[in-house]
Image: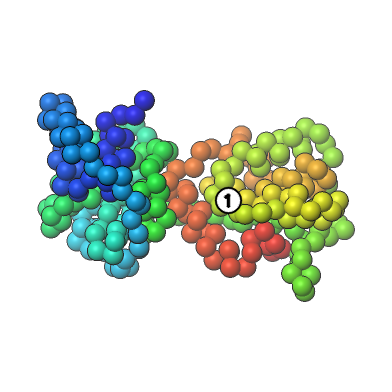
Amino acid sequence: MPTQHTRLLALAGAVSDGWLVVAREALAAGDAERLTSLFDALAAATPAAAAVPDFAAGAAEHSAADRAVVALAAELPITACWRVLRGGTDAVHLVQADEAADLPAVTAAVQAALEAAGEAAPRAEVFGPTTALPAYHEAALLAATLLWSAEPAVGVRIARTFDGATPDGGPFFAATRELVVDVDERQRLLDFLGGGEVVAPLPGTLRDLIAPVSGAVPVDLRSDGEWVWSDAARYYLDRHMVAPDPELARHAAERPGPARLSHLDRHRVRAALAPAAEGGPLWRAS
């Protein structure tokens, strides 16, 4: 069941920024009567459904508002914060808080800091590490600039699916590629590879290189926050016992299984994939 906080998250971009500021202040203050009257007035107005706006990263240098949000991390259970421009002009600050944080209280504090920094209508969107977010926030995060994070950046590695590619661009497996013949080990690896979150759904499928069946091999990219691998790796392990990237296999052996990604994890994975996508991560040989 959605909380009042998630109800307000869902209204971002669909109602006026000023209404959201007042409603979030009322929620943080525990003013149920005020919040109810605000929702009643909103229902009477019947706002039209809003399309997801265009978001862009904006300037690289930090503004006074950016610095004000980052400074709150010393006082509040904040784990990451971003800034993005909505419609080319309106700064939106996105804040990931601890799982157990009081999200309305953090939101009110961020709004107050933004107002003190000169923002007339502070746009502060606060959520937990794994909060399911509306399309508005997902689109904002895709374009946002990371301002600060509590955890240092971890280098995300991209697993090798094939052993190389021919001059015409076709991938191949080397004759020396190892096989995973032990049933228990293979199942453990299959569970790990299938348990990662899809971070880049890709259209179509590839031809099976070992037993040619047109359009048989899935190509979505998955991650556990530390590694990215193709669903093709799981396919070849499952159908033909072809071992995945040995370093990825060693990583999988040290983990019980992929955990759910936080919004910060997802941001870092996407950043790692951006340059790799130009060279075709599915055919990565080294």
x then y, percent, for residue 90: 24, 59
- Quarter placement of the N terminus: top left
5 and 129: which one is in front? 5
In the drawing, does residue 13 fall left or right of residue 34? right
In the drawing, does residue 18 fall left or right of residue 10? left
x then y, percent, for residue 42: 19, 37
Identified by mark 1, the residue type is Pro
Quadrant of residue 284 in the image?
Answer: bottom right
220 and 106: which one is in front? 220
Q: Secondary structure at mark 1?
A: loop
As drawn, which residue projects farthest toward the bottom? 167
- Identify the residue shown where x is 25% and y is 48%: 124
Give the residue number, with chain letter if any, for mark 1.
Answer: 201
- Identify the residue shown where x is 66% and y is 42%: 193
x then y, percent, for residue 225: 53, 47
Q: Is residue 134 visible?
A: yes
Quadrant of residue 83 in the image?
Answer: bottom left
x then y, percent, for residue 237: 77, 44
Q: How is the image coloured?
A: rainbow
Q: Is residue 111 visible?
A: no
- Identify the residue shown where x is 70% and y is 62%: 283
- Quarter placement of the C terminus: bottom right
Reply above or below: 110 against 207.
Answer: above
Total numbered badges shown on the rendered structure: 1
In the drawing, does residue 18 fall left or right of residue 248? left
- Identify the residue shown where x is 77% and y is 41%: 238
22 and 37: which one is in front? 37
Disc 1 packing (10 Å; few <14; some 14–19; many ≥20)? few
